[in-house]
Image (spheres, rainbow, N blue to C red):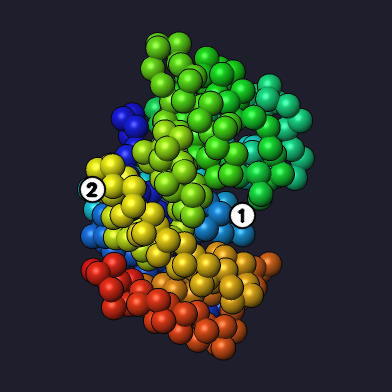
Amino acid sequence: MQQPIRGLVAAPFTPFHPDGSLNLDVIPAYARHLADTGVVAAFICGTTGEGASLTTAERKLVAEKWLESAPKELSVIIHVGHACTEDSRDLAYHAQHIGGAAVAAMAPYFFKPRNTGELVSICSHIAAAAPALPFYYYHIPSMTGVSLSVTAFCREAASAIPNLAGVKFTFEDLVDYAGCFSVRTPAGGSLDILFGRDELMPAAWDAGARGFIGSSYNFAAPLFGSVLEALASGDSDRAMELHGKAVRLIDAGLAIGVPGTAAFKAIMPMIGIDCGPVRPALAQPAPEQIARLRNALELNDFFTSKYELAHS
């Protein structure tokens, strides 16, 4: 994982039984599905994985099962962010102990860092618990409420965090995103700035993105992979055509009246990977909402086109 990540990284859903307990038995087939559909890594226990709704012990169990299950071509990045920095350190230490490929942490989201220096200090403390692993700062202000400049963070953190690998950037500020690429490490290298808004893939590509982390890649990696192929070949018309289809898929999920994570998790049984319900405070879609979602996907030929949503 020292090399920059290129291609699609899925942010997996955490599988639950109907009663909300962990269903780890789903993970082996899930990992195989991701690898078979062209995903290069899994970013586990993040926002899509409902990491903040899991206990620390549960997060360790999930990480262990992914490391046990992932085929060699699928790297496992473990999100260790927590409202409690010491729990983050515990999770980071555990991630290194079990052989994770990298760790990532969002900013604490209750008592928040007030400035770049405080954010760098917190991330440095977490990263030091797993010094042998690449560390990524996970920027997602919509969830954490921390909207500090990531370019400024990178400039300060590049020399303060020896194992800093880069950033997972899940925000719409493409000016700040592009600025991160100008930062150089003390050794003269660049940071790996991964992009996390699936619906903005072409714009992020133009800003320099070559690695992408998202929830849609759980069930639509072939479609998004084809967008990347078109972008890489310079066929912008084809890229925009395919990306329009991808955006319609995302919009179908967002239109049923529950949070996106809950809606997109409901797609997984449709492709043969049943990840169960979401945990509170996320709202589980009602049967009629799931039926509406399936109907929208069918109307847009998501199950029958070349880029069908299907378990390989």
User: Which residue is rendered at x = 58% and y = 73% of the image?
Assistant: 255
Q: Label 1 is placed on what type of residue?
A: Ala
Q: Kindly identify which numbered label has been placed on residue 231.
A: none
Query: What residue does disc 2 label?
Result: 73
**Local SS, label 1:** helix
User: Which residue is rendered at x = 63% and y = 72% of the image?
Assistant: 258
Q: Label 2 is placed on what type of residue?
A: Glu
Vertical placement of residue 258 versus 51, above or below? below
Q: Is residue 154 visible?
A: yes
| Residue found farthest to the front | 237
Query: Image check: 92 left or right of 75?
Result: right
Residue 101 placement (x, y as % from top left):
36, 39
**Other residues around mark 2 within 10 Å, as few (<14) / some (14–19) / many (≥20):** some
Q: Alpha carbon of mark 2 to alpha carbon of mark 1: how far?
A: 28 Å
Residue 241 placement (x, y as % from top left):
36, 59
Nearer-N-terminus badge (2/1): 1
Residue 240 placement (x, y as % from top left):
38, 54
> Which quarter of the rendering shows the C terminus?
bottom left
User: Which residue is rendered at x = 40% and y = 65% of the image?
Assistant: 245
Front residue (pair 217, 240): 240
**Local SS, label 2:** loop
Vertical placement of residue 194 versus 296, above or below? above
Query: Image check: 244 left or right of 35?
Result: right
* Quadrant housing residue 218: bottom left
User: Which residue is rendered at x = 35% and y = 59% of the image?
Assistant: 242
Residue 221 placement (x, y as % from top left):
33, 59
Count all numbered tags in the image, as a single digit: 2
Query: What residue does disc 1 label?
Result: 52
